[in-house]
Image (spheres, grey):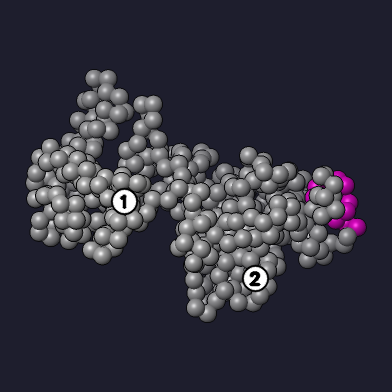
Amino acid sequence: MTEAASNGTGPLDGIRVIDFTEYIAGPYATMMLADMGADVVKVEPVTGDHWRQQAPVAPNESRVFLGLNRGKRSVALNAWSERGGELARRLAASADVVVMNYRPGVALDLRLDYDSVRATNPTVIHADITAFGHSGPYSHRGGFDLLSQASAGVMAYEARAQNGTPTGVRTIAPSDLTTAMFTAFGVVNALYQRIATGEGQRVSTNLFHSALAMQYRPLVSVEREDATERAALLALIESAQADGASYEDTLEIRQTAQGRLAVSNYYRVYQTKDGLVAVACLNNRLRRALRDLAGVSDPSIEGSVFRPASVPLAEHERVRQEMEAAFATRTTETWLSLLDEAKVPTAPFNLTEELYDDPHVIANNLIPTFEHPTLGTIRTPRSPIEMSASTVGALTPAPVLGADTEAVLGELGLSSEEIADLEAEGIALQWRPETAADGD
């Protein structure tokens, strides 16, 4: 078991997870379970998880892989071979939880789908992640975060364009990460229900549905008011596109109709005399406090209800210019002090590279160090969850490829000789420190 699981204090201590996932959504979901103390066994091809080969920093190691797989054990196994497939199914039969993110139909081909696993493991929780689900006209498609952002409207709502075409969120993969969190949430709820019923079940999530579900604001419609406005906007855009309008033209049409420009004056990053500072005011009391600090007038934020349409767009543009001019007269440190004193939500703007030395990060040990068998000291963000009576956060880094093949297959009853034969046939791979030291 992982160190986090073996210390006996994780809330999922004793839960065995067999992880047949790659890319982002699946590995992040199982890493969340590992952070909670589950023994997560990552079953990889003998060539390794896809991410191991993407911008590697050493053979079979990459930053993305390190960031998605801490606290797990690695078994390198060719599940498509007859013997490897049999072992993969035996691992699934030993699990409390099985997680996979294959394209629809692949799990069935491997006999690792829910019905097949349940036949030998009736209480299993089987989590299945796909791009678009198992029904509907998109269900046959594979997919990644970019496709979900595009098809589920996230990219359109972000309202960004590059070289004339839409671009979405790129710093993180929102569809992948929300799917991971929904998956982990579904798994722990299924485990909780199993305590009461003794029965397992399938947990299904997909990137498209997650991308819809996380849009608590743009996809909530009060139909008696919004349906007519929505139809008018779509008709306006359709007419503009028929006349040759570009995506950026339709972007401007949507932004104007939705009043985006007005909102951004109080929810944005401003340039100060020597840097940048972020402010986030989502009620009129906070907006007025910011306005007063900047010495700006803005009649649209009087009263308790924000009514940006009550003044012309030119007025909002005036406010923007005056706010920007005011922020440019003082340093970031001065603004942070003034905003904190006025209880206006604010934060410094940090470059990613600055976060390792950020005083708040250091005070809370938010990016701890780990000792990796081949890379030495690495740093990666820890779980943000804290619990008063449980240890949360895996204590080991992402595993090297095949680090635990012999141990895990030994738990299935295979002898050292049998495992050596599997290695000789290319069905399994076991990492050894001495071969790594030789550069093999």
* Front-most of residues 343 and 78: 343
Q: Is residue 115 visible?
A: no
Residue 170's quadrant in the figure?
A: top left
Q: Quadrant of the N terminus?
A: bottom right
Q: How far apart are the two marked residues, 2 and 1, measured between alpha carbons?
A: 47 Å
Q: Farthest right residue?
A: 417
Q: Amino acid at mark 2?
A: Ala
Q: Determine if the magenta segment contains residue 426.
A: yes
Q: Determine if the magenta segment contains residue 54.
A: no
Whole-percent x and y of residue 400? 72, 53
Residue shown at the point (68%, 73%) measured from the top left: 6
Residue shown at the point (19%, 49%) measured from the top left: 223
Q: Is residue 389 visible?
A: yes
Q: Farthest bottom residue?
A: 389
Whole-percent x and y of residue 302? 10, 56
Residues at marks 2 and 1 touching, judged by CB atoms closer than 8 Å: no
Q: How many marks?
A: 2
Crowd class of label 2 (few under 14; some 14 to 19; many from 20; radius 10 Å): many
Q: Is residue 279 left or right of residue 92?
A: left
As drawn, the label of residue 5 is 2
Crowd class of label 1 (few under 14; some 14 to 19; many from 20; radius 10 Å): some
As drawn, the label of residue 331 is 1
Q: Farthest top residue?
A: 243
Q: Is residue 172 left or right of residue 315?
A: right
Camera-nearest label, 2 or 1: 1
Whole-percent x and y of residue 288? 16, 57
Q: Amino acid at mark 1?
A: Thr
Q: Earlier in the sequence, mark 2 or mark 1?
A: 2
Q: Which residues are magenta?
A: 417-430
